[in-house]
Image (spheres, rainbow, N blue to C red):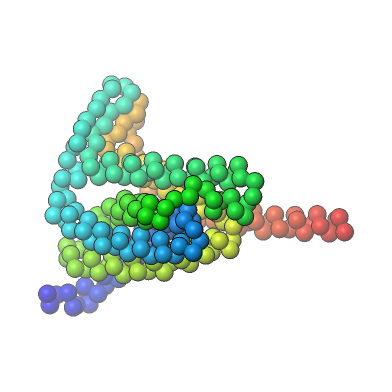
Amino acid sequence: MADLFTLESAMTLIMLTALQAVLGFDNLLYISIESRRVPEDKQAYVRRVGIGLAIILRIVLLFVVTAAVSSLTTPLFEFSLPGIAEGSINLHALIVLIGGVFIIYTALKEIMHMLTIDDIETGVESSAKRSIATSITWIVIMNLVFSFDSILSAMALTDKFILMATAIVISGLLMIYMADTVSEFLKKNRMYEVLGLFVLFIVGILLLSEGGHLGHLKFLDHPIEPMAKSTFYFVLVVLVLVDIVQSRYQKKLTRKRQSAQA
C-alpha cells in the first residue's frame, strides 16, 4: 500500500488519467448525439447518469479484464472460405466489431437525416426520439465498448488496480463536465454538427479495422490492418482545418455577394 504514495505512482496516475481522457474524446461525441434524442430539459441528466453508471461498470469491467485477460483472446469461432475470407474471432474482436458497426450506422443515419429534414432548427432534435432509460442504456453500452482499449492500454502502464480505478473515476468526472461543454458547443455552432458526425464515422472505421485485426480477418488473402492512432488524429486535424477554412471562405463569399447586391 505504501508504494501507492510515491512520485512514480503519482506520475503513473497522471498518465493514466490523460490516456483515459484522450481515448474518451470520441465517446463524448457519441454521448452528445445520443443525449439529444431525449427532451432538452432531460439531456444533461441523461449525460450525467449515463456516464456515472458507466464509471461504475468500467471499474467492474477493469476487474473482470484483469482477472481474465487471457479469455478475451481465446477464439470463440473460426471460419475459412479459401481465397475469399477467413478469421478467428475472439470476444475482444467481436465487441469492437459490433461497436464499430453501430457507430457507423449511427453516424450515417444522422447524416442522412440532416440531408432530408426541412426544418434545420428542429429536425435534428426530433430525430428518432428515445426514452430516457433507453438513451442512458446506449450511453453506458457504448462507453463500455470504448473502454476496452483504454483499459488494456492502462494495463500496459501499471498492474496496480487502485491506480487504474482512480484514473477511471477522475476521467469519468472530467467527461461529465466536458459532455455538457461539447453539447453546448455543438448546439451553439450548428455548422460543426456535420464535422462531428464524420469524425464519429471515422471512429467507427477505426473500430472496424481494429476489430478485424484482433479477429485475424482476411479478405481476398489480404489481412485487415488496424488504423494507426496517429493516422486517426492526423485525419481528425485535417477535417477540423478543412471545416474552419471552408466556413471562413464561405463567409467571405456571402459578404461579397451581399455587397454586390447592395
Q: Residue at x 17, y 54 (%)?
A: 64
Camera-nearest residue between 178 and 75: 178
Q: Position of residue 120 (x, y in %)?
A: 63, 51
Q: Residue at x 35, y 45 (%)?
A: 99
Residue at the limit of the structure toward the right, as seen here: 262
From the viewer's perspective, tell me whether residue 87 is left or right of residue 32: left
Q: How many marks?
A: 0
Answer with the quarter of the image where residue 18 lies. Answer: bottom left
From the viewer's perspective, tell me whether residue 26 is left or right of residue 120: left
Q: Is residue 213 above or below residue 53?
A: above
Residue at the limit of the structure toward the left, as seen here: 1
Camera-nearest residue between 155 and 180: 180
Q: Residue at x 58, y 63 (%)?
A: 188
Q: Quadrant of the C terminus?
A: bottom right
Camera-nearest residue between 11 and 77: 77
Q: Position of residue 148 (x, y in %)?
A: 28, 52
Q: Is residue 111 above or below residue 37?
A: above
